């Protein structure tokens, strides 16, 4: 099993993120205003900007470097931009957050 308990929902700020490491990969855990949790590799598909430092809104995160908007669910760039960052499955049990260490396929 490659699910890892990474903390509780309360460890992630509302409309913010926190990061966890998996080897050389940094994974950003995001929390929306309605307490949904998502996980993306902490690299924008454009110039590898730190998505964890972006603005969370409307099920997306905006990269702080060049304002690319990335879907929290799929990791896909939105609008006219194209590219994708790895999205990771998460599950919530009570208030505990579990992260699957292999990206969605």
Image: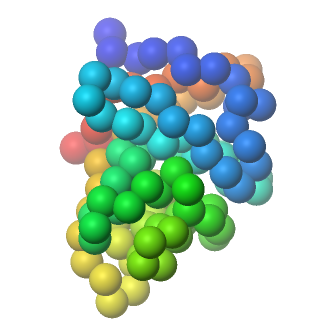
Q: Quadrant of residue 6?
A: top right
Depth check, front residue: 44 or 89: 44
Quadrant occupied by the N terminus? top left
Which color scheme did the rendering employ for the protein? rainbow
Which residue sits at x=37%, y=36%?
26
Residue 102 in view of the camera: no
Left/right of residue 68 with respect to residue 25 in the rendered view: right
Residue 73 in view of the camera: yes
Q: Quadrant of residue 81?
A: bottom left
Q: Position of residue 76 (x, y in %)?
A: 34, 66
Which residue sits at x=71%, y=30%?
11
Which residue sits at x=43%, y=55%?
50
Depth check, front residue: 50 or 5: 50
Quadrant occupied by the C terminus? top left
23 above or below 36? Answer: above
Q: Position of residue 15 (x, y in %)?
A: 71, 55
Q: Position of residue 37 (x, y in %)?
A: 60, 42
Which residue sits at x=62%, y=65%?
55
76 above or below 8? Answer: below
């Amino acid at each position: 099993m490659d699910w890892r308990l990474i903390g509780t929902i309360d460890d992630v700020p509302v409309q913010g993120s926190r990061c966890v490491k998996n080897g050389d990969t940094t994974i950003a855990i995001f929390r929306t205003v309605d307490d949904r949790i998502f996980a993306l590799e902490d690299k924008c598909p454009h110039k590898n900007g730190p998505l964890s430092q972006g603005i969370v809104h409307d099920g997306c995160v905006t990269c702080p470097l060049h304002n690319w908007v990335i879907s929290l669910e799929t990791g896909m760039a939105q609008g006219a931009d194209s590219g994708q960052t790895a999205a990771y499955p998460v599950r919530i049990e009570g208030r505990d957050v579990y992260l699957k260490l292999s990206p969605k396929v």
